Amino acid sequence: MNILEVKSLYKTYPNGCQALKDVSFEVAQGEFLVVIGLSGSGKSTLLRCINRIHPASSGQIIFEGQEVTGLKGKELRKLRSQIGMIFQHFNLVPRKSAMVNVLTGVLARVGIMRSVLGLFSKEDQTEAIEKIKIVNLAGKEDVRADNLSGGQQQRVSIARALMQRPKLLLADEPVASLDPATSNSVMQYLEKINKEMGVTVICNLHFLSLVRRYATRVIALKGGEIVFRGTPEQITEEWFKTIYGEDAVEVSVH
């Protein structure tokens, strides 16, 4: 069963830059799909179109059988509540505690005013503690986000996304700002969420060593177009050069 279908997606920015060109693919329930490609290839734009941070110029995005490209207001908020997002630079409130940052994940359920005022229910607080435990940060609930390491901050952002109770989790270069050891740690939590909680994951990555370790399937973008579809094992040296350029050298993260 497909949780997501993208059909002939185009995205052109106001400055004329065509970021996506006729992109079509499907994502099955429970997949860990990784999107690869050079910086500027359209990976981030693709994720932002899926959760409607950016509107697509044309094409269709179908989530659980529902066309979502034209949703507005309440229906759009409902969609976003089912699609979690993890960013490269964490997007936490630095002066707030890990607990408060995680609790902001219930925004779609409780509304902006209650979230801003910190009016979270006992049930929400209990759930937040559970999500913090999932990413192995128990005991850090009261620590300010800016006093946490980069890897810990990214794990807080994962816990925040889990508070949405998402069916689909989008991760936009989630380890690009982290060292190799921390990168694997963060990826292991995403894998756990995928395999043990059944959350479908679409993740943008640069390092093929991580792609080969965690992806169930891969698509590659180049100049806004899909140039490769397949399994990690099918990315040969020839395909690597096609995707990244003849002068590219593969760097591993261990």
Image: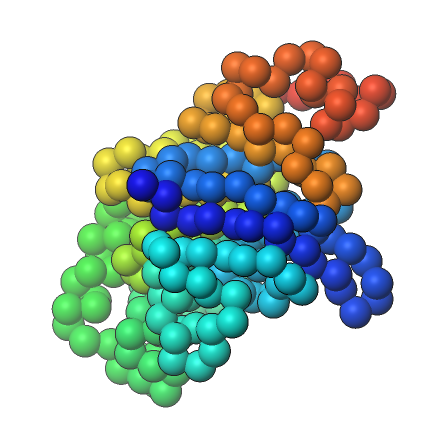
x, y (%) of residue 54? 61, 65
In-front residue for pair 87/247: 247
In-front residue for pair 52/91: 52
x, y (%) of residue 26? 47, 41
> What is the residue that sits farthest to the top in this orientation?
237
- In the rendered view, tell whether residue 220 sits above or below residue 21: above
In-front residue for pair 180/246: 246
Left/right of residue 165 with respect to residue 247 in the rendered view = left
Residue at (35, 60) in percent of width and height: 82
Q: Is residue 86 visible?
A: yes
x, y (%) of residue 237? 69, 12
- Res 119 quadrant in image: bottom left
- Res 214 quadrant in image: top left
Residue at (44, 63) in percent of width and height: 67
- In the rendered view, tell whether residue 24 sits above or below residue 33: below
Q: Is residue 95 visible?
A: no
Left/right of residue 186 with respect to residue 39 in the rendered view = left
